[in-house]
Image (tube, rainbow, N blue to C red):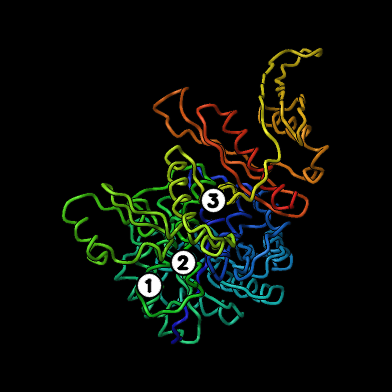
Protein backbone atom coordinates (compact mmCIF):
# COMPACT_ATOMS: atom_id res chain seq x y z
CA UNK A 1 0.00 0.00 0.00
CA UNK A 2 1.73 3.15 -1.19
CA UNK A 3 0.61 6.36 0.52
CA UNK A 4 2.25 8.83 2.84
CA UNK A 5 -0.43 9.09 5.57
CA UNK A 6 0.60 7.47 8.87
CA UNK A 7 -2.09 6.86 11.52
CA UNK A 8 -1.22 7.09 15.21
CA UNK A 9 -2.69 4.68 17.77
CA UNK A 10 -2.14 5.35 21.48
CA UNK A 11 -2.37 2.43 23.93
CA UNK A 12 -1.25 4.25 27.11
CA UNK A 13 -4.51 3.53 28.93
CA UNK A 14 -4.08 -0.24 28.45
CA UNK A 15 -0.46 -1.10 27.63
CA UNK A 16 0.73 1.70 29.90
CA UNK A 17 -1.43 0.41 32.74
CA UNK A 18 0.55 -2.84 32.63
CA UNK A 19 3.71 -1.06 33.77
CA UNK A 20 4.84 -1.77 37.29
CA UNK A 21 3.59 0.84 39.75
CA UNK A 22 0.95 2.26 37.40
CA UNK A 23 -2.66 2.31 38.56
CA UNK A 24 -4.93 4.63 36.58
CA UNK A 25 -8.25 5.70 38.02
CA UNK A 26 -11.23 6.17 35.72
CA UNK A 27 -10.76 9.94 36.17
CA UNK A 28 -7.10 9.60 35.14
CA UNK A 29 -8.12 7.72 32.01
CA UNK A 30 -10.66 10.33 30.99
CA UNK A 31 -8.24 13.22 31.52
CA UNK A 32 -5.43 11.47 29.62
CA UNK A 33 -7.77 10.47 26.79
CA UNK A 34 -8.85 14.08 26.29
CA UNK A 35 -5.23 15.26 26.33
CA UNK A 36 -4.38 12.65 23.69
CA UNK A 37 -7.34 13.78 21.60
CA UNK A 38 -6.08 17.36 21.77
CA UNK A 39 -2.76 16.17 20.31
CA UNK A 40 -4.57 14.95 17.21
CA UNK A 41 -4.13 11.18 17.56
CA UNK A 42 -6.25 8.96 15.35
CA UNK A 43 -6.99 6.17 17.84
CA UNK A 44 -7.06 6.13 21.65
CA UNK A 45 -7.26 2.68 23.20
CA UNK A 46 -9.27 2.98 26.40
CA UNK A 47 -8.70 -0.45 27.90
CA UNK A 48 -10.23 -3.91 28.02
CA UNK A 49 -13.99 -3.91 28.77
CA UNK A 50 -14.90 -6.56 31.28
CA UNK A 51 -11.32 -6.95 32.52
CA UNK A 52 -11.60 -4.74 35.62
CA UNK A 53 -13.95 -2.19 37.25
CA UNK A 54 -11.81 0.79 36.20
CA UNK A 55 -12.01 -0.05 32.51
CA UNK A 56 -15.72 -0.73 32.84
CA UNK A 57 -16.22 2.69 34.48
CA UNK A 58 -14.26 4.35 31.65
CA UNK A 59 -16.36 2.73 28.91
CA UNK A 60 -19.57 3.44 30.80
CA UNK A 61 -18.83 7.18 30.61
CA UNK A 62 -16.58 7.82 27.61
CA UNK A 63 -15.00 11.28 27.46
CA UNK A 64 -15.99 13.41 24.48
CA UNK A 65 -13.35 13.50 21.74
CA UNK A 66 -13.08 15.62 18.62
CA UNK A 67 -10.64 13.62 16.51
CA UNK A 68 -9.43 10.55 18.36
CA UNK A 69 -11.59 7.43 18.04
CA UNK A 70 -11.88 5.46 21.28
CA UNK A 71 -10.87 1.80 20.92
CA UNK A 72 -12.00 -1.16 23.02
CA UNK A 73 -9.36 -3.89 23.26
CA UNK A 74 -9.98 -7.59 23.64
CA UNK A 75 -9.05 -11.01 22.32
CA UNK A 76 -10.47 -13.40 19.77
CA UNK A 77 -13.00 -15.98 20.90
CA UNK A 78 -11.91 -18.98 22.93
CA UNK A 79 -11.38 -22.37 21.29
CA UNK A 80 -14.56 -24.36 20.88
CA UNK A 81 -16.94 -21.40 21.32
CA UNK A 82 -18.87 -19.40 18.80
CA UNK A 83 -18.01 -15.69 18.81
CA UNK A 84 -21.61 -14.81 19.77
CA UNK A 85 -21.34 -16.98 22.90
CA UNK A 86 -17.96 -15.88 24.17
CA UNK A 87 -18.42 -13.61 27.26
CA UNK A 88 -15.04 -11.93 26.88
CA UNK A 89 -15.60 -11.02 23.25
CA UNK A 90 -19.16 -9.90 23.98
CA UNK A 91 -17.93 -7.44 26.62
CA UNK A 92 -15.65 -5.81 24.05
CA UNK A 93 -18.27 -5.64 21.32
CA UNK A 94 -20.94 -4.35 23.70
CA UNK A 95 -18.74 -1.46 24.88
CA UNK A 96 -19.67 2.01 23.66
CA UNK A 97 -16.38 2.55 21.81
CA UNK A 98 -16.75 2.85 18.02
CA UNK A 99 -13.63 0.75 17.31
CA UNK A 100 -12.63 -2.73 18.49
CA UNK A 101 -9.08 -4.08 18.40
CA UNK A 102 -8.80 -7.86 18.86
CA UNK A 103 -5.54 -9.63 19.61
CA UNK A 104 -4.88 -13.13 18.35
CA UNK A 105 -2.08 -15.67 18.18
CA UNK A 106 0.10 -15.80 15.07
CA UNK A 107 2.96 -17.92 16.45
CA UNK A 108 2.32 -21.66 16.06
CA UNK A 109 4.24 -22.29 19.28
CA UNK A 110 1.74 -20.17 21.24
CA UNK A 111 -1.25 -21.78 19.56
CA UNK A 112 -0.05 -25.12 20.90
CA UNK A 113 1.26 -23.91 24.28
CA UNK A 114 -1.23 -21.23 25.36
CA UNK A 115 -4.41 -22.00 23.42
CA UNK A 116 -3.88 -25.77 23.35
CA UNK A 117 -5.79 -26.02 20.11
CA UNK A 118 -5.11 -26.72 16.45
CA UNK A 119 -3.66 -24.29 13.96
CA UNK A 120 -6.87 -24.54 11.92
CA UNK A 121 -9.04 -23.68 14.93
CA UNK A 122 -6.88 -20.63 15.67
CA UNK A 123 -7.45 -19.38 12.11
CA UNK A 124 -11.18 -19.89 12.58
CA UNK A 125 -11.03 -17.99 15.89
CA UNK A 126 -9.39 -15.02 14.15
CA UNK A 127 -11.80 -15.01 11.21
CA UNK A 128 -14.99 -15.58 13.22
CA UNK A 129 -14.14 -12.94 15.81
CA UNK A 130 -13.12 -10.25 13.33
CA UNK A 131 -16.16 -10.90 11.14
CA UNK A 132 -18.48 -10.38 14.12
CA UNK A 133 -16.56 -7.27 15.22
CA UNK A 134 -16.87 -5.80 11.72
CA UNK A 135 -20.63 -6.30 11.87
CA UNK A 136 -20.98 -4.84 15.36
CA UNK A 137 -18.54 -1.93 15.27
CA UNK A 138 -17.76 1.01 13.02
CA UNK A 139 -14.26 -0.43 12.62
CA UNK A 140 -12.36 -3.54 13.69
CA UNK A 141 -8.61 -4.07 13.89
CA UNK A 142 -6.38 -7.10 14.49
CA UNK A 143 -3.24 -7.20 16.64
CA UNK A 144 -1.01 -10.07 15.51
CA UNK A 145 0.59 -11.04 18.81
CA UNK A 146 4.24 -12.21 18.72
CA UNK A 147 4.10 -11.86 14.97
CA UNK A 148 7.85 -11.54 14.38
CA UNK A 149 8.59 -14.67 16.41
CA UNK A 150 5.82 -16.45 14.55
CA UNK A 151 7.08 -15.29 11.16
CA UNK A 152 10.58 -16.56 11.88
CA UNK A 153 9.21 -19.91 13.11
CA UNK A 154 6.62 -20.52 10.38
CA UNK A 155 6.36 -17.80 7.76
CA UNK A 156 3.41 -19.31 5.91
CA UNK A 157 1.26 -19.79 9.01
CA UNK A 158 1.96 -16.29 10.35
CA UNK A 159 0.94 -14.82 6.99
CA UNK A 160 -2.15 -17.04 6.92
CA UNK A 161 -3.25 -15.50 10.24
CA UNK A 162 -2.90 -11.99 8.80
CA UNK A 163 -4.71 -12.97 5.62
CA UNK A 164 -7.54 -14.47 7.63
CA UNK A 165 -8.03 -11.25 9.65
CA UNK A 166 -7.91 -9.08 6.52
CA UNK A 167 -10.42 -11.26 4.65
CA UNK A 168 -12.78 -11.01 7.65
CA UNK A 169 -12.75 -7.24 7.24
CA UNK A 170 -10.08 -5.96 9.64
CA UNK A 171 -9.33 -2.33 8.76
CA UNK A 172 -5.79 -2.65 10.11
CA UNK A 173 -3.57 -5.68 10.72
CA UNK A 174 -0.86 -4.75 13.21
CA UNK A 175 2.41 -6.66 13.46
CA UNK A 176 3.40 -6.93 17.13
CA UNK A 177 6.96 -7.34 18.39
CA UNK A 178 5.49 -8.46 21.70
CA UNK A 179 8.68 -9.51 23.46
CA UNK A 180 10.65 -6.54 22.13
CA UNK A 181 13.55 -8.67 20.92
CA UNK A 182 13.55 -7.86 17.20
CA UNK A 183 16.21 -5.47 15.87
CA UNK A 184 15.70 -2.80 13.16
CA UNK A 185 17.33 -4.86 10.41
CA UNK A 186 14.96 -7.76 10.99
CA UNK A 187 11.98 -5.39 11.23
CA UNK A 188 12.88 -3.89 7.85
CA UNK A 189 13.23 -7.27 6.18
CA UNK A 190 10.11 -8.89 7.64
CA UNK A 191 7.74 -5.92 7.25
CA UNK A 192 8.89 -5.49 3.65
CA UNK A 193 8.21 -9.19 2.98
CA UNK A 194 4.74 -8.95 4.54
CA UNK A 195 3.93 -5.80 2.54
CA UNK A 196 4.98 -7.58 -0.67
CA UNK A 197 3.04 -10.75 0.18
CA UNK A 198 -0.12 -8.86 1.24
CA UNK A 199 -0.09 -5.69 -0.90
CA UNK A 200 -3.75 -4.80 -0.25
CA UNK A 201 -3.60 -5.21 3.55
CA UNK A 202 -3.18 -2.08 5.68
CA UNK A 203 -0.31 -2.86 8.04
CA UNK A 204 0.42 -1.48 11.48
CA UNK A 205 3.40 -1.84 13.82
CA UNK A 206 3.47 -2.38 17.59
CA UNK A 207 6.90 -2.51 19.25
CA UNK A 208 8.09 -3.11 22.78
CA UNK A 209 11.31 -1.57 24.01
CA UNK A 210 13.23 -4.48 25.50
CA UNK A 211 16.30 -3.76 23.33
CA UNK A 212 15.81 0.05 23.44
CA UNK A 213 14.78 -0.06 19.78
CA UNK A 214 11.01 0.41 19.90
CA UNK A 215 10.99 3.89 18.30
CA UNK A 216 13.67 2.93 15.76
CA UNK A 217 11.78 -0.25 14.90
CA UNK A 218 8.53 1.67 14.45
CA UNK A 219 10.11 4.26 12.15
CA UNK A 220 11.82 1.49 10.18
CA UNK A 221 8.51 -0.33 9.73
CA UNK A 222 6.91 2.87 8.43
CA UNK A 223 9.70 3.28 5.88
CA UNK A 224 8.91 -0.12 4.35
CA UNK A 225 5.12 -0.08 4.38
CA UNK A 226 3.47 0.11 7.83
CA UNK A 227 0.99 2.98 7.98
CA UNK A 228 -0.34 2.66 11.53
CA UNK A 229 1.94 3.02 14.56
CA UNK A 230 0.98 1.95 18.06
CA UNK A 231 2.74 3.35 21.11
CA UNK A 232 2.33 5.02 24.49
CA UNK A 233 3.05 8.37 26.10
CA UNK A 234 6.59 8.40 27.51
CA UNK A 235 7.01 4.79 26.36
CA UNK A 236 5.02 3.56 29.34
CA UNK A 237 4.35 -0.17 29.31
CA UNK A 238 5.10 -3.68 30.50
CA UNK A 239 8.71 -4.63 31.27
CA UNK A 240 10.85 -2.01 29.44
CA UNK A 241 7.84 -0.26 27.92
CA UNK A 242 6.43 0.37 24.46
CA UNK A 243 7.36 2.66 21.58
CA UNK A 244 7.37 6.22 22.92
CA UNK A 245 4.90 8.32 20.93
CA UNK A 246 6.24 11.51 22.50
CA UNK A 247 9.52 11.08 20.61
CA UNK A 248 8.12 9.14 17.67
CA UNK A 249 5.55 11.80 16.71
CA UNK A 250 7.98 14.72 16.25
CA UNK A 251 10.42 12.43 14.46
CA UNK A 252 7.69 11.55 11.94
CA UNK A 253 6.29 15.07 11.65
CA UNK A 254 9.50 17.11 11.61
CA UNK A 255 12.05 14.75 10.08
CA UNK A 256 10.20 12.75 7.42
CA UNK A 257 7.87 13.45 4.51
CA UNK A 258 5.10 11.27 5.93
CA UNK A 259 1.77 12.90 6.80
CA UNK A 260 -0.01 12.48 10.14
CA UNK A 261 -3.07 13.97 11.80
CA UNK A 262 -0.86 16.07 14.09
CA UNK A 263 -1.11 19.82 13.48
CA UNK A 264 1.21 22.55 14.78
CA UNK A 265 -0.94 23.26 17.83
CA UNK A 266 -0.96 19.56 18.73
CA UNK A 267 2.79 19.26 18.30
CA UNK A 268 3.29 22.15 20.73
CA UNK A 269 1.37 20.21 23.38
CA UNK A 270 3.76 17.24 23.44
CA UNK A 271 5.80 18.50 26.41
CA UNK A 272 2.65 19.31 28.35
CA UNK A 273 1.07 15.90 27.69
CA UNK A 274 4.29 14.13 28.65
CA UNK A 275 4.38 16.04 31.94
CA UNK A 276 0.64 15.57 32.48
CA UNK A 277 1.04 11.79 32.46
CA UNK A 278 3.82 12.01 35.04
CA UNK A 279 1.70 14.24 37.25
CA UNK A 280 -1.17 11.76 37.05
CA UNK A 281 1.23 9.01 38.10
CA UNK A 282 2.80 11.15 40.84
CA UNK A 283 6.21 10.92 39.16
CA UNK A 284 8.91 13.45 38.39
CA UNK A 285 9.37 13.98 34.62
CA UNK A 286 12.61 12.49 33.33
CA UNK A 287 14.91 15.39 32.45
CA UNK A 288 16.73 13.45 29.73
CA UNK A 289 13.74 12.64 27.55
CA UNK A 290 14.22 13.36 23.85
CA UNK A 291 12.33 16.43 22.58
CA UNK A 292 10.38 17.14 25.80
CA UNK A 293 12.79 16.67 28.72
CA UNK A 294 14.08 19.62 30.74
CA UNK A 295 17.59 18.83 29.50
CA UNK A 296 16.65 18.24 25.86
CA UNK A 297 17.63 21.81 24.92
CA UNK A 298 19.81 22.72 27.91
CA UNK A 299 23.24 24.26 27.33
CA UNK A 300 25.84 24.66 30.03
CA UNK A 301 28.51 27.29 29.46
CA UNK A 302 31.51 27.22 27.17
CA UNK A 303 31.47 26.81 23.41
CA UNK A 304 27.93 25.42 23.25
CA UNK A 305 26.38 28.54 24.77
CA UNK A 306 28.45 30.81 22.57
CA UNK A 307 27.43 28.90 19.46
CA UNK A 308 23.75 28.73 20.43
CA UNK A 309 23.72 32.48 21.07
CA UNK A 310 24.88 33.05 17.49
CA UNK A 311 22.64 30.42 15.88
CA UNK A 312 20.60 27.85 17.86
CA UNK A 313 20.84 25.40 14.95
CA UNK A 314 24.47 24.76 15.81
CA UNK A 315 23.54 22.57 18.80
CA UNK A 316 19.77 22.11 18.52
CA UNK A 317 18.26 19.72 15.98
CA UNK A 318 14.85 21.51 16.11
CA UNK A 319 13.34 24.68 17.54
CA UNK A 320 12.28 23.57 21.07
CA UNK A 321 9.12 25.64 20.86
CA UNK A 322 7.78 23.34 18.11
CA UNK A 323 7.19 20.63 20.73
CA UNK A 324 6.23 22.95 23.59
CA UNK A 325 9.68 22.79 25.18
CA UNK A 326 12.12 25.63 25.74
CA UNK A 327 15.81 26.40 25.55
CA UNK A 328 17.61 26.51 28.87
CA UNK A 329 20.94 28.32 29.19
CA UNK A 330 22.20 27.33 32.60
CA UNK A 331 24.31 30.44 33.13
CA UNK A 332 21.65 32.82 31.74
CA UNK A 333 18.11 31.50 31.60
CA UNK A 334 16.21 33.05 28.67
CA UNK A 335 13.45 30.46 28.61
CA UNK A 336 9.74 30.57 28.90
CA UNK A 337 8.21 33.51 27.01
CA UNK A 338 7.05 31.65 23.88
CA UNK A 339 5.60 28.81 25.92
CA UNK A 340 3.73 31.23 28.20
CA UNK A 341 2.39 33.16 25.22
CA UNK A 342 1.09 29.89 23.72
CA UNK A 343 -0.73 29.10 26.95
CA UNK A 344 -2.19 32.61 27.06
CA UNK A 345 -3.51 32.21 23.52
CA UNK A 346 -5.22 28.95 24.54
CA UNK A 347 -7.00 30.92 27.29
CA UNK A 348 -8.03 33.64 24.86
CA UNK A 349 -5.73 36.23 26.46
CA UNK A 350 -3.84 38.65 24.21
CA UNK A 351 -1.54 40.83 26.36
CA UNK A 352 -0.96 43.30 23.52
CA UNK A 353 -4.61 43.88 22.69
CA UNK A 354 -5.37 44.30 26.38
CA UNK A 355 -2.87 47.13 26.61
CA UNK A 356 -0.62 45.19 28.96
CA UNK A 357 2.52 44.55 26.90
CA UNK A 358 4.57 43.58 29.96
CA UNK A 359 2.15 40.89 31.11
CA UNK A 360 3.98 38.02 29.41
CA UNK A 361 7.28 38.99 31.02
CA UNK A 362 5.67 39.33 34.43
CA UNK A 363 3.90 36.03 34.01
CA UNK A 364 7.11 34.26 32.92
CA UNK A 365 8.85 35.53 36.04
CA UNK A 366 5.92 34.50 38.24
CA UNK A 367 5.70 31.02 36.72
CA UNK A 368 9.45 30.49 37.13
CA UNK A 369 9.28 31.58 40.76
CA UNK A 370 6.35 29.27 41.41
CA UNK A 371 7.97 26.33 39.63
CA UNK A 372 11.12 26.89 41.66
CA UNK A 373 8.96 26.47 44.76
CA UNK A 374 7.61 23.19 43.36
CA UNK A 375 4.49 24.16 41.42
CA UNK A 376 3.74 22.22 38.22
CA UNK A 377 1.29 24.01 35.94
CA UNK A 378 1.36 21.49 33.07
CA UNK A 379 -0.76 19.21 35.20
CA UNK A 380 -2.86 21.99 36.76
CA UNK A 381 -4.16 24.24 33.98
CA UNK A 382 -6.87 25.78 36.18
CA UNK A 383 -4.25 27.15 38.59
CA UNK A 384 -2.27 28.53 35.66
CA UNK A 385 -5.35 30.28 34.28
CA UNK A 386 -6.04 31.86 37.67
CA UNK A 387 -2.42 33.01 37.93
CA UNK A 388 -2.64 34.72 34.53
CA UNK A 389 -6.05 36.28 35.08
CA UNK A 390 -5.10 37.53 38.54
CA UNK A 391 -2.20 39.41 36.94
CA UNK A 392 -4.78 40.95 34.62
CA UNK A 393 -6.95 41.84 37.57
CA UNK A 394 -9.84 39.76 36.24
CA UNK A 395 -10.42 37.46 39.23
CA UNK A 396 -12.43 39.01 42.10
CA UNK A 397 -11.65 38.30 45.74
CA UNK A 398 -14.57 35.97 46.40
CA UNK A 399 -13.48 35.29 49.97
CA UNK A 400 -10.55 35.92 52.27
CA UNK A 401 -9.21 33.32 54.67
CA UNK A 402 -8.60 34.56 58.21
CA UNK A 403 -7.64 31.22 59.71
CA UNK A 404 -8.32 27.49 59.65
CA UNK A 405 -7.67 24.70 62.11
CA UNK A 406 -7.80 20.95 61.43
CA UNK A 407 -7.72 18.24 64.10
CA UNK A 408 -7.77 14.45 63.92
CA UNK A 409 -9.33 12.23 66.56
CA UNK A 410 -8.48 8.50 66.65
CA UNK A 411 -10.56 6.68 69.23
CA UNK A 412 -12.79 3.75 70.09
CA UNK A 413 -16.45 4.51 69.50
CA UNK A 414 -19.35 3.32 71.63
CA UNK A 415 -19.25 -0.08 69.89
CA UNK A 416 -15.56 -0.52 70.63
CA UNK A 417 -14.57 0.01 66.99
CA UNK A 418 -11.45 2.04 66.27
CA UNK A 419 -12.41 5.11 64.19
CA UNK A 420 -10.57 8.18 62.93
CA UNK A 421 -12.43 11.44 62.44
CA UNK A 422 -11.21 14.80 61.18
CA UNK A 423 -12.68 18.16 62.12
CA UNK A 424 -11.98 21.46 60.38
CA UNK A 425 -12.78 24.97 61.61
CA UNK A 426 -12.59 27.73 59.02
CA UNK A 427 -12.93 31.47 59.50
CA UNK A 428 -13.52 33.43 56.28
CA UNK A 429 -14.56 36.87 55.21
CA UNK A 430 -17.32 36.48 52.64
CA UNK A 431 -19.13 39.47 51.12
CA UNK A 432 -17.74 41.74 53.83
CA UNK A 433 -18.87 39.55 56.70
CA UNK A 434 -16.88 37.17 58.91
CA UNK A 435 -18.06 33.56 58.91
CA UNK A 436 -16.84 30.67 61.05
CA UNK A 437 -17.89 27.14 60.16
CA UNK A 438 -17.07 23.68 61.48
CA UNK A 439 -17.32 20.38 59.59
CA UNK A 440 -16.24 16.78 60.11
CA UNK A 441 -14.97 14.46 57.42
CA UNK A 442 -13.29 11.13 56.81
CA UNK A 443 -9.95 12.90 56.48
CA UNK A 444 -8.46 16.36 57.03
CA UNK A 445 -8.83 17.46 53.39
CA UNK A 446 -12.42 16.25 53.21
CA UNK A 447 -13.24 18.08 56.45
CA UNK A 448 -11.55 21.26 55.20
CA UNK A 449 -13.42 21.08 51.90
CA UNK A 450 -16.76 20.62 53.66
CA UNK A 451 -16.10 23.51 56.05
CA UNK A 452 -15.13 25.82 53.19
CA UNK A 453 -18.24 24.95 51.20
CA UNK A 454 -20.43 25.33 54.28
CA UNK A 455 -19.19 28.90 54.69
CA UNK A 456 -19.48 29.80 51.01
CA UNK A 457 -22.73 28.14 49.91
CA UNK A 458 -25.07 30.82 51.35
CA UNK A 459 -23.35 33.39 49.11
CA UNK A 460 -22.37 31.16 46.18
CA UNK A 461 -25.02 28.53 45.56
CA UNK A 462 -23.35 27.36 42.35
CA UNK A 463 -20.78 25.52 44.48
CA UNK A 464 -23.43 22.98 45.52
CA UNK A 465 -22.67 20.62 42.62
CA UNK A 466 -18.88 20.86 42.94
CA UNK A 467 -17.02 17.80 44.18
CA UNK A 468 -13.45 16.52 44.53
CA UNK A 469 -12.74 13.59 42.22
CA UNK A 470 -9.01 13.02 42.73
CA UNK A 471 -6.28 13.97 45.20
CA UNK A 472 -2.56 13.36 44.79
CA UNK A 473 0.42 14.25 46.97
CA UNK A 474 4.07 14.26 45.96
CA UNK A 475 7.00 14.73 48.29
CA UNK A 476 9.31 17.22 46.52
CA UNK A 477 12.23 17.13 48.96
CA UNK A 478 12.38 13.56 50.31
CA UNK A 479 15.82 14.21 51.76
CA UNK A 480 14.17 16.56 54.26
CA UNK A 481 12.22 13.70 55.85
CA UNK A 482 9.14 14.82 57.76
CA UNK A 483 9.99 18.47 57.01
CA UNK A 484 9.72 17.87 53.26
CA UNK A 485 7.92 20.25 50.90
CA UNK A 486 4.79 18.66 49.42
CA UNK A 487 2.82 19.31 46.25
CA UNK A 488 -0.91 18.59 46.20
CA UNK A 489 -2.88 18.17 42.97
CA UNK A 490 -6.68 18.23 43.25
CA UNK A 491 -9.09 17.37 40.47
CA UNK A 492 -12.60 18.76 40.80
CA UNK A 493 -15.80 18.24 38.84
CA UNK A 494 -19.31 19.64 38.75
CA UNK A 495 -22.77 18.71 37.56
CA UNK A 496 -22.15 20.22 34.14
CA UNK A 497 -19.44 17.67 33.38
CA UNK A 498 -16.53 20.08 33.78
CA UNK A 499 -13.26 18.75 35.23
CA UNK A 500 -10.40 20.97 36.37
CA UNK A 501 -7.10 20.48 38.19
CA UNK A 502 -5.44 22.84 40.67
CA UNK A 503 -2.16 22.71 42.58
CA UNK A 504 -0.81 23.83 45.94
CA UNK A 505 2.70 23.66 47.40
CA UNK A 506 3.77 24.01 51.02
CA UNK A 507 5.92 22.30 53.69
CA UNK A 508 2.56 21.67 55.39
CA UNK A 509 0.41 19.17 53.53
CA UNK A 510 -2.84 20.65 54.86
CA UNK A 511 -1.77 24.13 53.81
CA UNK A 512 -0.86 22.83 50.32
CA UNK A 513 -4.29 21.19 50.18
CA UNK A 514 -6.00 24.43 51.16
CA UNK A 515 -4.17 26.34 48.40
CA UNK A 516 -5.31 23.80 45.80
CA UNK A 517 -8.85 23.76 47.24
CA UNK A 518 -9.05 27.54 47.22
CA UNK A 519 -7.94 27.67 43.59
CA UNK A 520 -10.50 25.01 42.66
CA UNK A 521 -13.30 27.07 44.22
CA UNK A 522 -12.07 30.34 42.69
CA UNK A 523 -11.86 28.75 39.22
CA UNK A 524 -15.43 27.45 39.48
CA UNK A 525 -16.74 30.84 40.66
CA UNK A 526 -14.81 32.76 38.01
CA UNK A 527 -15.90 30.47 35.17
CA UNK A 528 -19.53 30.93 36.21
CA UNK A 529 -19.28 34.69 36.43
CA UNK A 530 -19.91 34.87 40.18
Disc 2 and disc 1: Cα gap in Å?
A: 10 Å
- Residue 400: x and y in percent read 67, 33
Using the image, tell me which numbered label, if any, was put on residue 267.
2
* Residue 298 visible in the picture: yes
Question: What residue sits right under mark 3 in the picture?
Answer: 17
Residue furthest toward the front?
355
Crowd around label 2: few <14 · some 14–19 · many ≥20 (10 Å): many
- Residue 456: x and y in percent read 77, 36
Question: Could you tell whether 84 is left or right of 342 in the image?
Answer: right
* Residue 116 visible in the picture: no
51 or 269: which is nearer to us?
269
Question: Could you tell whether 246 is left or right of 188 in the image?
Answer: right
Question: Could you tell whether 298 is left or right of 191 in the image?
Answer: left
Using the image, tell me which numbered label, if any, was put on residue 177.
none
Task: Evaluate if marks 2 and 1 touch, with contact meaning CB atoms under 8 Å apart.
Answer: yes
Residue positioned 49% across, 72% down in the render: 262
User: Is disc 3 placed on a helix, strand or loop?
Assistant: helix
User: What is the quadrant of residue 64 in the picture?
Assistant: bottom right
Using the image, tell me which numbered label, if any, was put on residue 254.
1
Amino acid sequence: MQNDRVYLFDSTLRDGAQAQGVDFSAADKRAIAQALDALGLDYIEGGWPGANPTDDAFFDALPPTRRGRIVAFGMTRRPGRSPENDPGLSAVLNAAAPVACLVGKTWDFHVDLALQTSLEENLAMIGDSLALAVRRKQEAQFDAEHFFDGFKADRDYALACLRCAAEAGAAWVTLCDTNGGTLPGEIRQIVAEVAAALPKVRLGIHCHNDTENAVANSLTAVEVGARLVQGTVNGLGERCGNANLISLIPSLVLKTAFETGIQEEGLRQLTGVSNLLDERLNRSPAAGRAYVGANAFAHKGGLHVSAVAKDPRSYEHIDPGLVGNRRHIVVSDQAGRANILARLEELGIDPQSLGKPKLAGRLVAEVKAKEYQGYAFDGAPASFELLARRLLGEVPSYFALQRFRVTDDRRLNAKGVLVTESEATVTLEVAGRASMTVATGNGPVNALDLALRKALLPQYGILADMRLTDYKVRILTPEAGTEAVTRVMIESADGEGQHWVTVGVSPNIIDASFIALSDAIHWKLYRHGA
